[in-house]
Image (cartoon, helix red, strand yellow):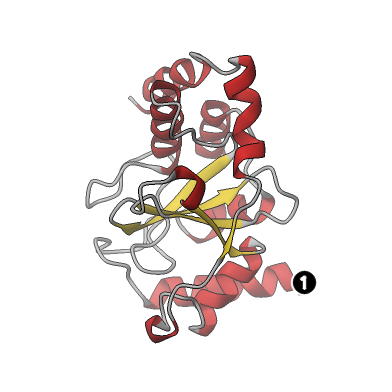
Amino acid sequence: MTENEQLLARVAAKAASTRPWGWPSLPDPADAATLARAEAALGFRLPPLLADLYLRTGDGGFGPEYGLLPLLDSAPAGEPSAVSQYLAQRKSGQEDPEWPWPEGVLPISHWGCGMYACVDCHSPQATVLLFEPNPGDPDQAWFVDAPSLTDWLNAWLDGTGWYDVPDEGLEMAPWTEFRIRVAPAQEQGQGKGQDQDQAEGAAGATA
């Protein structure tokens, strides 16, 4: 069994025995068609491990705190899906250039108070980021939660995530790539309207 298979087995075991807030039961895994629609709406592929979580464990409803967001359907508590949240953030960033949202950074779970765990789907290791907008400064809103999705999952499984040790305080390195990642769209005007079209397509696919 590979390390990836061992990790997925540990995730499945914990997902079967714990329920995040707002999830009465573990949803069935997403099917390949749902994943394909999600990736088409997003305009990029999910990292293999993230795709496997949705395809093999459940379509959201497991993980730290409030759990992973579903890919396309709203969560039982009414939280938007990962795809809907991403497209909404991208659209909001186009309307308010002071708060741009980086392309390829997918919200996968929320912490409340506008905070999200996000996977950088364009990084080779699927870096997990924390979006914390409450200080009111976009340049101080992004942090590296874990170098990789593997590390982030292991922290949840081992009970060593920052959310499990509140007395230690929230000490994370800033995500220094934020301005680099949003600069091309701001300077060249790329992506204007593209995400809105994708959002409409996603809505049609889930209707």
- In the image, residue 17 sits, relative to residue 201, either above or below, namely below
Residue at figure coordinates x 52%, y 44% from the top left: 106
Callout 1 crowding tier (Cα within 10 Å): few <14, some 14–19, many ≥20: few
Residue 7, visible in the rendered structure: yes
Q: Secondary structure at mark 1?
A: loop
Q: Which residue is mark 1?
A: 2
Q: With 118 as the anchor, is 173 left or right in this view?
A: right
Residue at figure coordinates x 57%, y 18% from the top left: 191
The quadrant holding residue 96 is top left
| Front residue of this view, candidates 194 and 144 | 144
Q: With 177 as the anchor, is 172 left or right in this view?
A: left
Q: Position of residue 152 (x, y in %)?
A: 57, 68
The C terminus lies in quadrant: top left
The quadrant holding residue 186 is top right
Q: Position of residue 130 (x, y in %)?
A: 49, 57
Q: Position of residue 190 (x, y in %)?
A: 60, 17
| Front residue of this view, candidates 138 and 2 | 138
Q: Position of residue 72 (x, y in %)?
A: 41, 38
Residue at figure coordinates x 63%, y 33% from the top left: 44
- In the image, residue 187 sits, relative to residue 18, either above or below, namely above
Residue 28, visible in the rendered structure: no
User: What's the residue type where badge 1 is placed?
Assistant: Thr
Q: With 89 as the anchor, is 74 left or right in this view?
A: left
| Front residue of this view, candidates 74 and 125 | 125
